[in-house]
Amino acid sequence: MSAADCEQQETGWGILEDLPGDPMIWVLIFSELAAFGLFLGAFIVARAIHPAMFAAGQATLDAHLAGLNTIVLVTSGWAAARGTAAARAGDKRAARGWLLGAMALGGVFIAIKLFEYAGEIGQGIGLETSSFFTLYFLLTGFHLLHVGLGIVILAVVSRGAEAAGVETGTAFWHMVDLLWIVMFPIIYLVQP
């Protein structure tokens, strides 16, 4: 048995050891990606079965607000990455500042999404309007909950601003970014 094999047996994390942050966050991230993948798969299959319903539903969405939210969330990911770099350099004050910026932009994302929901609900659109809107509200609502959770995680890790904690928190935040980058075109742009 080689030294590398012995080391892997001692830690038990295997390839997760090489990823930034705590290996447990990666277990959570992979499980969340699987859950969102199933949701998106259901959305894509339902769209293939009911293209007219999905086209009509998609036509009522505000792709401009969703596009703005994409810019906001990607920018927050950039701020989180800057926070990680600052934490690694030992600059806790800068790390906290960048993480605060990421959290504030996450708050802007939530505000825009809630404004979008209010407009839809104001038009009489809800979970039971159609299969499109059931899946739309479930997917985007589930994502919105993750944005809120990500803000809480960033707030917790920014207190100590230690590199390992910040890497762990920003790994989750980048997952939230990645999910929206995949969801945005599928829900708002790709025509059935």
Image (cartoon, rainbow, N blue to C red):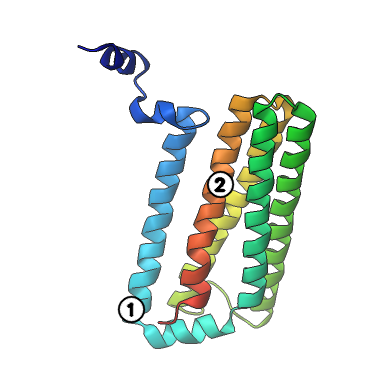
Q: Is residue 10 above or below residue 80?
A: above
Location of residue 41 (image quadrant)? bottom left
What residue sits 46% from the left and 85% below the top? 55
- The residue lying toward the viewer, choosing from 18 and 39, is 18
Looking at the picture, how far across and down is residue 106, in whole percent? 69, 52
Name the quadrant of the N terminus: top left
C-alpha gap between disc 1 and disc 2? 30 Å
The amino acid type, in three-letter code, at marker 2 is His
Looking at the picture, how far across and down is residue 5, in whole percent? 26, 16
What residue sits 65% from the left and 62% below the top? 71
In the visual, does 170 lie left or right of 187? Answer: right
Badge number at residue 174 = 2
What residue sits 55% from the left and 56% below the top? 143
Q: Residue furthest front?
A: 89
In the visual, does 192 lie left or right of 59? Answer: left
- The secondary element bearing badge 1 is classed as helix
Mark 1 or 2, closer to the camera: 2
- The residue lying toward the viewer, choosing from 15 and 131, is 15
Residue topped by disc 1: 48
Residue 43 in sight in this render:
yes
